[in-house]
Image (cartoon, rainbow, N blue to C red):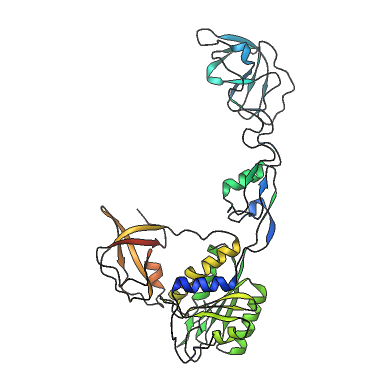
């Protein structure tokens, strides 16, 4: 793509079109699999079908505290017609019973303990009475299998328990352990290199001199990368020098699956990053997106890997990350894009916008007796990062709308959980 540095954008691609063009060129797919221990598999995406290696449970066990009996011995038992059985032992959970429950015999049993040989059911403790140490009175009848968890009742050996592509949750880790797995194959986490550019930038913690700016982008973007389940690689700050920018980009692409650069992406004479990307392979695919904030966003391929060039202002960078980085990281992770949580809210004042530009409006949401209301923040420049902190919602105005009218109800994306 021809450089726009010093010339300005001749056109802007619509957001959806920009993403479509980029993904078509990228041909992104899930990364290769790796084996991890079960405790480290939370929120990872399965790269294999998982089959049970054992029955769950692998022995008949009691589902209650009570007495193990032969059902034929307690036929017709009731509180007015109790059956007295000889007590031949007891079984605690984790023990293996060595005795047999014979005719007119019973054994005390704990929840989860193996059913002794000869018994076929369990009568709950509430419906029994011990008579000394050698006998028990049974006050309720039972049928075979009552209060017994049979072998394989939960899972049968050989059953498919989890499908490839499943994002593993805590209960999934539980069943993996239950069916005999200690490791599992999951899609490798994408590595995402993050680079800031600009002579004006200094690291957080530095004493800002006149004209210098503390780099807020890298902490924010690297955190956003982690939230998406990827591994961030911090490449630091590059000065506005072609050689240094190229050196750091090459280093990042050698280590990472995706490179994100903030700053130096617009049309000024010092916006050098797009020209560097154009020297490293396919180059820039889209430069200039019809989103506000975030218009200078660029998407490209360098050294065979995807590169996202985000604006230097923090708000614009974060919003462009949400639009373009999230779906790419999801694809690489083998997962489906996370559905954003939204609420319906009534807008308290008119929000203007220009046709042809998708607007991302930061709002504060409040709950009223008639539902949620959304108040647009009045200070919302793309460099005002406090606006992202003060807002708890994001209202998106599509390209074909001329704003949102006062009192209109619309969907609002939640930026943080709402307080009651």
Number of dots carrying numbers = 0
| Nearer-the-camera pick, 197 or 6 | 6
**Looking at the image, is 418 positioned above or below residue 160?**
below
**Looking at the image, is 8 positioned above or below residue 55?**
below
What x and y, as percent, mark residue 179?
Answer: 67, 42
| Nearer-the-camera pick, 294 or 202 | 294
**Looking at the image, is 414 positioned above or below residue 75?**
below
Instruction: Report the side of 373 relative to 267 (left or right).
Output: left
What x and y, as percent, mark residue 305?
Answer: 62, 74
**Looking at the image, is 80 positioned above or below residue 147?**
above
Residue situated furthest right in the rendering:
98
Residue 227 in sight: yes
Instruction: Report the side of 113 relative to 141 (left or right).
Output: right
Q: Quadrant of the N terminus?
A: bottom right
What x and y, as percent, mark residue 79?
Answer: 50, 11
| Nearer-the-camera pick, 281 or 238 | 281
| Nearer-the-camera pick, 71 or 6 | 6
Residue 223 in sight: no
Q: Residue at (69%, 22%) from the top-left corner?
A: 116
What x and y, as percent, mark residue 150?
Answer: 64, 29
Tell me the quarter of the picture where residue 105 sits: top right
Tell me the quarter of the picture where residue 371 sits: bottom left
């Amino acid at each position: 793509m021809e450089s726009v540095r010093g010339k300005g954008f001749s056109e802007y691609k619509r957001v959806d079109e920009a993403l479509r063009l980029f993904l078509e060129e990228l041909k992104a797919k899930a990364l290769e699999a790796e084996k991890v221990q079960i405790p480290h598999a939370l929120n990872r995406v399965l790269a294999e079908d998982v089959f049970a290696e054992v029955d769950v449970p692998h022995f008949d066990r009691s589902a209650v505290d009570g007495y193990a009996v032969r059902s034929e011995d307690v036929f017709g038992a009731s509180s007015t017609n109790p059956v007295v059985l000889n007590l031949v032992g007891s079984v605690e959970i984790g023990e293996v019973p060595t005795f047999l429950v014979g005719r007119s015999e019973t054994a005390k049993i704990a929840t989860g303990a193996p059913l002794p040989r000869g018994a076929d059911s369990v009568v709950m403790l509430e419906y029994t009475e011990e008579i000394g140490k050698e006998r028990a009175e049974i006050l309720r009848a039972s049928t075979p299998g009552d209060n017994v968890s049979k072998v394989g009742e939960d899972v049968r050996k050989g059953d498919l328990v989890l499908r490839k592509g499943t994002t593993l949750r805590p209960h999934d880790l539980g069943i993996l352990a239950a069916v005999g797995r200690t490791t599992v194959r999951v899609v490798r986490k994408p590595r995402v290199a993050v680079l800031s550019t600009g002579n004006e930038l200094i690291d957080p913690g530095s004493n800002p001199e006149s004209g210098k700016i503390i780099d807020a982008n890298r902490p924010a973007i690297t955190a956003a990368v982690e939230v998406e389940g990827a591994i961030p690689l911090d490449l630091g700050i590059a000065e506005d020098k072609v050689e240094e920018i190229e050196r750091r980009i090459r280093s990042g692409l050698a280590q990472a699956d995706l490179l994100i650069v903030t700053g130096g992406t617009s049309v000024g004479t010092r916006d050098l990053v797009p020209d560097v990307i154009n020297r490293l392979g396919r180059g820039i695919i889209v430069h200039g997106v019809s989103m506000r904030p975030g218009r200078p966003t660029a998407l490209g391929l360098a050294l065979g890997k995807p590169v996202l060039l985000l604006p230097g202002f923090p708000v614009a960078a974060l919003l462009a990350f949400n639009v373009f980085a999230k779906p790419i990281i999801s694809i690489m992770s083998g997962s489906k894009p996370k559905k954003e949580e939204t609420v319906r809210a009534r807008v308290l004042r008119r929000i203007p916008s220009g046709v042809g530009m998708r607007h991302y409006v930061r709002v504060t949401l409040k709950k009223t007796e008639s539902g949620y209301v959304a108040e647009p923040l009045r200070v919302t420049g793309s460099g005002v990062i406090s606006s992202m902190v003060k807002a708890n919602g994001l209202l998106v105005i599509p390209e074909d709308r001329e704003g949102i009218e006062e009192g209109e109800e619309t969907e609002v994306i939640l930026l943080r959980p709402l307080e009651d």
